[in-house]
Image: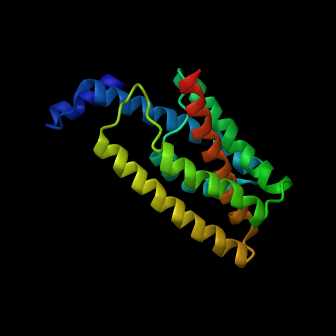
Amino acid sequence: MKNKIYNYLVNNNIYLEKDVFEYGFEYFLSYLVYLLIVIPISILTDSFIEIMLFIILYIPIRKNIGGLHLKKRYHCLMLSIIITLVVPILTNYIFLNIYLLLIPIILNTFLYIMFVPVDCKEKKLSQVEIKYYKIKSLILHLIYFTLYTFTFLYNIDFVFQVLCIIEIISSFSIITSKIKVYI
């Protein structure tokens, strides 16, 4: 199927390097599998809104900060599914307050300035890309901080809690990726 799609694109004057296409196709399939597992489970567990909110808000920050990369795509997929499915459990059973949130916000501000974006040896970033992702991640961090404040002040608890979890997961991702580099 992958080759048929690639050949179709080439035959219609849409040129991509084969390895770039294959990487993108594998990436697309991973997201498709991820969604095909996560969405039905979220519907069955009545956590669709929390999980979709998490996905919508976490993907942009994860894309810009980088973070932990596992050696096998299958392991990344499984870890992503587990983390996503744990979010509603955390929002339902752990009460997060504004004071608890200050710790990961301050920690992430430091981590974003010092270590973001976390580089991956499979895809080294240029200095221009590093600067771009650092600025973009800091802007997103500021936007999310504004959202935290707004959702806290107006008692939109489930959104506030999802945002808190995103901050905690982001901290964890950056720290573990930096530790992994030194191990």
Residue 112 percent coordinates (x, y): 51, 50
Would residue 51 be seen by someone viewing this image from the given angle? no
- In this view, 49 is above or below 121: below
Tell me if 82 is positioned left or right of 18 in this view.
right
Residue 115 in the image: above or below residue 183: below
Image quarter (top left, top right, bottom left or bottom right) of the C terminus:
top right
Quarter that holds the N terminus: top left
- Using the rendered image of the protein, determine whether residue 114 is visible from the camera's viewpoint: yes
Residue at x-position 52% and y-position 46%:
62
Q: Nearer the viewer, residue 83 or 130?
A: 130
Q: Residue 175 vs residue 13: left or right?
A: right
Q: Count of labels shown?
A: 0
Task: Find residue 90 and report its horizontal and vertical position in percent.
Answer: 79, 50
Residue found at the very far left of the displayed protein: 13
What residue appears at the point 71 percent right and 79 percent down from the top-left corner? 154
Against 127, residue 100 (above or below) is below
Instruction: Give coordinates of residue 24: x percent, y percent.
Output: 37, 33
Q: Nearer the viewer, residue 96 or 92?
A: 96
Name which residue lies at 61% across and 38% down: 175
Picture residue at 46% right of the left edge, 54% below the top: 137
**Left or right: where does residue 111 sit relative to residue 14?**
right
Viewer-proximal residue, 155 or 29?
155
Q: Residue furthest right?
A: 93
Which x, y percent locates residue 41? 71, 43
Question: Residue 174 occupies which quadrant of the picture?
Answer: top right
Instruction: Indicate how the structure is coloured in the image.
Output: rainbow
Front residue of 4/84: it is: 84
